[in-house]
Image (spheres, rainbow, N blue to C red):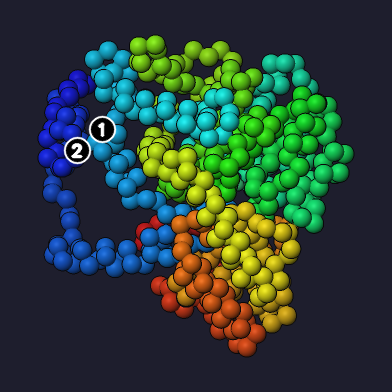
């Protein structure tokens, strides 16, 4: 097929008129053409608009409701980033366009954006080099652990396990196992940190590394990171930083300065880009110098003349983990977000995330008797166990919130806390929203004590009532009829 490039004039203010349109000179073959007209429903435009507007109103989203979903954070996605990332020069780029010569002019800007983003993330995290290829946080973890494995193999190290605290995100042990390691789980101490003595007892010459979610899923920052890093490096192990919760520390600490060797970030959590459950998203991974050779291909390089290209020549690389530019649209949004924030903005964002979480934690402590793990970072966890005496469980509380226009927080995770409720307000919510959340929680706890059946019936304001979620997950029917 022969491709030609056409110029189009979008005629929108602020959009350059040199946008590129791709079209084919070849007719569609008759075997692919309809012989009879399609049967389309005969409805008026007004009916169509009403139908889709009504459907959109059923949606529960960050644009319509408070969404304090701990760990999986549904943050706001600035509309300015959406608009800037949607210019045709970015959305129209085809991964098969040539990087250099002629067509190269069309892709140099996009490659430059990726190159700059890699360097920005290096600066923010204190790590030497980044790949933007992984398409989700868990994908970043797998990429990182595969690089750790490649490093050990290259050095002839005989390693067989990775140490992970029980407060880590659930994807950490899954990634370690997928990369071929056994997982040694370390319980948390009473402050919610990895128990240091148990960790030291588990550490030995066979330890490939330690994966720390930081801050962890209890919202706790481990204050013994330096000691842990030193001990792990002594046995030629590597320190992995799960930086999905980076929105709690960005602008304040750098994982590279703390002694970590590998780190993934969740652009869709920390850098305010849309979040699809488990992807599509973006989980860039940064590494220290000694792990550079193992980074996945392709790598973006820049010549002295300022020409960017994708480089596939990396003999020790772990290979391909995703095609072409990674999840380019998400990276573009995050890049714009970071440029909008700047250094000061980044610090302000993490400060507000921590302030909001602590505000809520202190307001709710008398109601729920939140375990005293001290100040939290961006999120905190409390237990709904005391409600079981009234026959009410965390799930009932969560469903009751839906009727009061609040998306439930993460529940029953982490597993180490019975009847867990994990709350992350994020930096983007103001005080009125947080105070309303506290009032709703007070109302629900009162209801649990006085009229528990009302909570068992919730939600009553949604198109469908209480679902059997386990059955829905295990007995899926993927059909429209
Ligand atoms: C701490 C942590 N690590 C890893 C992940 C996995 O990220 P993803 O859902 O993009 O695979 C998450 C998800 O939100 C997370 O909170």
User: In the picture shown, does residue 16 fall above or below 77?
Assistant: above
Q: Where is residue 156 in the image (x, y as percent from the top left)?
A: 75, 16
Identify the residue at image location x=18%, y=67%.
Answer: 47
Closer-to-camera residue (272/351): 351
Judging by the rendered image, the residue that carries numbered circle 1 is 89
Identify the residue at image location x=73%, y=65%.
Answer: 371
Q: Where is residue 134 in the image (x, y as percent from the top left)?
A: 50, 34
Under tag 1, what secondary structure?
helix
Tag in front: 2 or 1? 2
Q: Position of residue 139 (x, y in %)?
A: 55, 37
**Residue 226 is drawn in which quadrant?**
top right
How crowded is the residue under tag 1: few (<14 C-alpha within 10 Å), some, or many (20+)?
some
Identify the residue at image location x=77%, y=31%.
Answer: 230
Closer-to-camera residue (195/412): 195
**The C terminus, quarter of image:** bottom left
Identify the residue at image location x=87%, y=39%.
Answer: 201
In this rendering, position of residue 377 left or right of residue 30: right
User: In the picture shown, does residue 397 fall above or below 333?
Assistant: below
**Residue 308 is drawn in which quadrant?**
top left
């Amino acid at each position: 097929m022969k491709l030609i490039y056409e110029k189009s004039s979008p005629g929108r203010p602020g959009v350059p008129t040199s946008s590129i349109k791709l079209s084919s000179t070849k007719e569609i073959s008759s075997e692919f053409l309809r012989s009879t007209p399609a049967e389309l429903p005969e409805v008026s435009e007004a009916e169509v608009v009403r139908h889709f507007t009504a459907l959109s109103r059923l949606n529960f989203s960050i644009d319509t409701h408070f969404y304090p979903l701990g760990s999986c954070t549904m943050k706001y996605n600035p509309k300015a980033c959406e608009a800037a990332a949607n210019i045709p020069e970015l959305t129209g780029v085809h991964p098969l366009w040539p990087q250099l010569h002629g067509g190269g002019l069309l892709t140099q800007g996009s490659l430059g954006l990726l190159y700059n983003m890699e360097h920005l993330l290096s600066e923010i995290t204190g790590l030497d080099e980044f790949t933007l290829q992984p398409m989700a946080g868990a994908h970043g973890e797998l990429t990182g652990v595969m690089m750790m494995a490649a490093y050990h193999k290259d050095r002839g190290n005989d390693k067989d396990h990775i140490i992970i605290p029980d407060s880590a995100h659930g994807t950490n042990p899954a990634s370690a196992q997928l990369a071929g390691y056994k997982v040694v789980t370390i319980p948390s101490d009473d402050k919610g940190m990895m128990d240091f003595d148990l960790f030291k007892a588990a550490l030995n010459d066979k330890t490939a590394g330690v994966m720390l979610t930081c801050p962890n899923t209890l919202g706790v920052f481990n204050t013994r990171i330096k000691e842990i890093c030193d001990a792990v490096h002594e046995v030629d192990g590597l320190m992995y930083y799960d930086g999905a919760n980076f929105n709690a520390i960005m602008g304040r600490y750098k994982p590279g300065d703390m002694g970590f060797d590998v780190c993934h970030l969740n652009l869709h959590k920390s850098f305010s880009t849309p979040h699809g459950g488990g992807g599509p998203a973006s989980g860039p991974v940064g590494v220290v110098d000694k792990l550079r050779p193992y980074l996945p291909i392709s790598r973006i390089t820049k010549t002295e003349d300022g020409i960017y290209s994708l480089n596939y020549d990396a003999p020790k690389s772990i290979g391909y983990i995703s095609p072409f530019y990674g999840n380019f649209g998400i990276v573009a949004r995050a890049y714009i977000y970071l440029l909008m924030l700047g250094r000061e903005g980044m610090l302000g964002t993490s400060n507000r995330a921590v302030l909001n979480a602590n505000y809520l934690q202190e307001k709710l402590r008398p109601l729920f008797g939140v375990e005293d793990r001290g100040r939290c970072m961006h999120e905190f966890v409390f237990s709904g166990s005391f409600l079981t005496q009234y026959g009410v469980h965390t799930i009932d509380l969560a469903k009751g919130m839906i009727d009061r226009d609040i998306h439930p927080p993460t529940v029953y995770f982490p597993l180490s806390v019975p009847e867990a409720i994990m709350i992350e307000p994020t930096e983007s919510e103001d005080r009125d929203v947080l105070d309303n959340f506290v009032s709703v929680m007070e109302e629900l706890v009162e209801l649990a004590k006085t009229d528990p059946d009302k909570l068992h019936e919730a939600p009553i304001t949604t198109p469908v009532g209480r679902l059997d979620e386990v059955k829905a997950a295990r007995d899926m029917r993927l059909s429209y009829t």
